Image: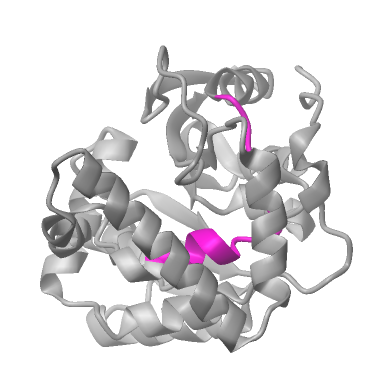
Amino acid sequence: MHPAPEVDLEKASAHDGSAAFEFGRNWQQFSRLLDEERIEHATTQLQRLLGVQSLEGRSFFDIGCGSGLHSLAALRLGAARVLAIDVDEVAVQTAQDVLSRHWNEHNYVVEPGNVLDLDPGLESAFDVVYSWGVLHHTGDMWTAIRRAAACVAPGGRFAIAIYRRTPLCGFWAWEKRLYTRSGPALRRLLEGGYWALKIGHRLVRLKNPSRRIREYKEKRGMDWRTDVVDWLGGYPYQSATPDEVTRFVEGLGFRQVQRFNTLEGRRRLGVLGSGNAEFLFERIAH
């Protein structure tokens, strides 16, 4: 088994006991935007990441469920059983509300839970374990990945998204800590500055920023403004190179099936952020 890679730039964002960002409130606001179109986009993108058309008869574990949108997508794809957990109680309530509104069967459970404290009874319990953009916010990313991976049954699939490491990860760790500890006025200032930066970046490249915002829902059913707040406030914060993630998970007894958005061969400073690399692994059945 490969040891966890050494961390340097991310040390500033290790969980130091200070309050983490309140992701739940952000997802609660996002849940009000959910409609059939967003749910369909989320379902299609889940199929893409998992490399399947259906989850018929399979169990699905959603770690860091947020709004509950992707637990709903799994149910729409035929998952026989879904367990969704989140460390944020507002997110738990939001996911419960979303699933109760959009799913009539009772084959799911939403409950509070921290991936770092998972019950050993969940080991090897699920056909699919899914955690998109969550494990790098735990303050102990490599342990979180190990604990999540342990829940995958032999032959099962492990789908995660992890921030790509860039030269500016140290800056973003500092910014996220500042945002999380700030009041409404400074948060609005940071949001406005970041929006201007992103819009200006598209204009310089002769691309229409309004079109980008309108079409953003096609990206996993998400919302542009919600993701801006999620990015600016995402503390604790860690990142890794795609190869580090692949080597680490393969060292836990998995093989990589596919990975997306790794930007191999392209140098990125991370001025607009890290971005998520997506990974799909399969647990080797001995």
Query: Eyeballing the image, is 109 above or below 52?
Result: below
User: Is residue 261 visible from the viewing direction of this image?
Assistant: yes
Q: Nearer the viewer, residue 232 or 241?
A: 232
User: Considering the image in quadrants, where does the N terminus appear?
Assistant: top right
Residue that appears at 57% across and 54% down = 134
> Farthest right residue?
16
Residue 21 lies left or right of residue 103; in this view the side is right
Render colour scheme: one colour
Give, as a single range, the part of the protein colored magenta.
227-241
Q: Position of residue 193 (x, y in %)?
A: 45, 65
Locate residue 99, reporting x and y percent. 34, 79
In the image, 81 versus 76, the foreground residue is 76
**Quarter location, residue 205:** top left
Q: Can residue 77 be spotted in the picture?
A: no
Q: Please give the name of the residue rendered at 47% of the width and 77% of the height, measured from the top-left corner.
A: 26
Name the residue at the top extreme: 265
Image position of 162 with respect to 199: above or below: above
Residue 149 in the image, given as x and y percentages of width and height: 62, 38
Q: Inspect the magenta stretch and tell me whether residue 236 lies in it.
A: yes
Residue 92 magenta:
no
